[in-house]
Amino acid sequence: DGGITQSPKYLFRKEGQNVTLSCEQNLNHDAMYWYRQDPGQGLRLIYYSQIVNDFQKGDIAEGYSVSREKKESFPLTVTSAQKNPTAFYLCASSIREPSYNEQFFGPGTRLTVL
Amino acid sequence: AQSVSQHNHHVILSEAASLELGCNYSYGGTVNLFWYVQYPGQHLQLLLKYFSGDPLVKGIKGFEAEFIKSKFSFNLRKPSVQWSDTAEYFCAVIGGATNKLIFGTGTLLAVQP
């Protein structure tokens, strides 16, 4: 089955710890995205990557970092600098061109920082 | 900056009622528009999209949306909702140089049997 997997589904961390969220896709998509979903705020773009070894900041990149060493993988690290990290994190992917193509979403990771 | 407004945050309907969810965007150039749905416990998935051509687009599960350029709107409609339509619905737009997908804040629809 082609799709996007995110692990784990639920993640708990203590304040001050960095945590890395996994995102893997087997859709052969070039572009990948990380969003944060908070109640009443919709989805906000954290980082995106159009191609391997390249990525750009989204609208709320502060306190987050990413890497794109492989086409299939786009892990997101939530650092201790992120002031309000508790949220639902969604990963997505799409073909790169044209840019308005449909994005496919993973099941999400719910991060709770205690 | 582009933005997307969804004015209805919570909607409660009885089965068989008609549905219309509002979506307005703020970009004046060429846009591409989407409606996504998130059923309880499931992935966010595409309902329908508009790129060009007929402004009335049909999606999955009997949903449709109409692009009205003069009103900067892309409202979602369904003539008769079912209990299984209970979900959160997101309008999204891509336009301009950024090529980033901008989401609205979402509308939570509850359909009562």
Image (cartoon, rainbow, N blue to C red):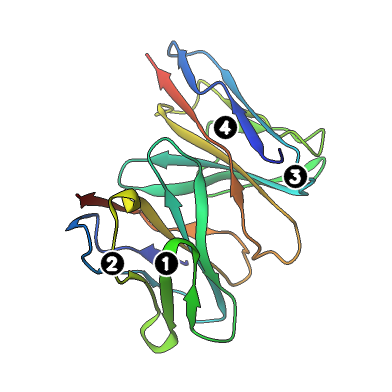
Q: Which mark is residue A8?
A: none
Q: Which three-letter amino acid code belongs to the residue tagged 2?
A: Ser
For residue B78, what is the image quadrant?
bottom left
Mark-to-mark CA distance, 2 and 1: 9 Å
* Residue denoted by label 1: B62
Location of residue B31 (image quadrant): bottom right
Q: Do marks 2 and 1 share a chain? A: yes
Asked if residue A10 is positioned above or below residue A73 in the image, the reply reads: above
State the residue in front, B87 or B80. Answer: B80
Residue B94 in percent (x, y) is at 56, 67
- Image position of A44 (left or right of A19): left
The alpha-carbon separation of the residues under discs 3 and 1 comes to: 27 Å
Between disc 4 and disc 1, the foreground one is: 1
Q: Earlier in the sequence, mark 2 or mark 1?
A: 1
Figure check: A71 above or below B12: above
- Tell me the CA gap for discs 4 and 2: 43 Å
Q: Chain of mark 1?
A: B
